[in-house]
Amino acid sequence: MAGYVSDAVIRRLPAYNRHLRELEEEGILQISSQELGDRMGLTPSQIRQDINSFGGFGRQGYGYQVKELRQHIRHIMGLDQEHRMVIIGAGRMGQAIANYTGFPRQGFFTEALFDIDPAKIRMGTAEMPVYHADELEERLKELHAVIGVLALPPEAAQDTLDRLYRSGIRAIWNFSPVDLHYPPDMAVVNVHLSDLLQILSYQMKRQQEE
């Protein structure tokens, strides 16, 4: 893989993976940068620049082999291996994440949820256990999780992140509406849903003004 890759390119990688998967399902074996750009709303030169950020996978005048390019993209993103997750917070958001069938298809599997509410703990099953949050450190010793998902109130998020870090978890998917402090060797992705709605509101207002 190349050295520095811009955040903009990284944010487009899931779209490449999705479109290439759809092309595979349609039985398309080869595609040009022009055709892929038309499909994704990007220019052919942007497609080539993005893909060349990770090495040259196409042949000039022939375009890209769809299956081969998708395999490269998936490898770049670490999607050619399984990732096990634990979810801290078994409320509506945590349950929605645990029950979403699209994640296992992408190689992301939930091993357990954690909560402090006895009613939610009783909802656990053998296939999807819900443990008390006090058991987090001990349970992580027997689980194979590498990702911690935070779906809990903001006042509990920082302490939970710190506990996960001390237990060896280095990747966090944060749904709690709070900015967290974390060490440089930890990867954190925030999903602040209200922020996304505010961006949508801005885009709507801009369209109205135009």
Image (spheres, rainbow, N blue to C red):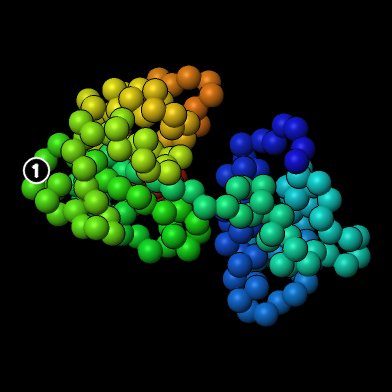
* Residue 183 relative to residue 201: left or right: right
Kind of element beneath mark 1: helix
What percent of the width, then of the height, locates residue 208?
41, 50
Which residue is at a point 52% across and 52% down the rendered structure image? 82
What percent of the width, then of the height, locates residue 101?
38, 64
Q: On screen, 184 above or below 131? A: above
Which residue is at a point 78% across and 72% down the rendered structure image? 30
Q: On screen, 193 above or below 70? A: above
What percent of the width, then of the height, locates residue 127?
28, 59
What percent of the width, then of the height, locates residue 25?
61, 76
Which residue is at a point 75% across and 75% down the rendered structure image? 29
Pointer 1 residue: 118
Residue extending furthest toward the front: 142
* Residue 100 relative to residue 147: left or right: left
Type of amino acid under label 1: Pro
In which quadrant of the rendered view does residue 161 lie?
top left
* Residue 51 relative to residue 39: left or right: right
Residue extending furthest toward the bottom: 27
| Nearest the eye: 182 or 198 | 182
Residue extending furthest toward the right: 61
- Does any portion of residue 192 appear in the rendered image? no
| Nearest the eye: 202 or 47 | 47
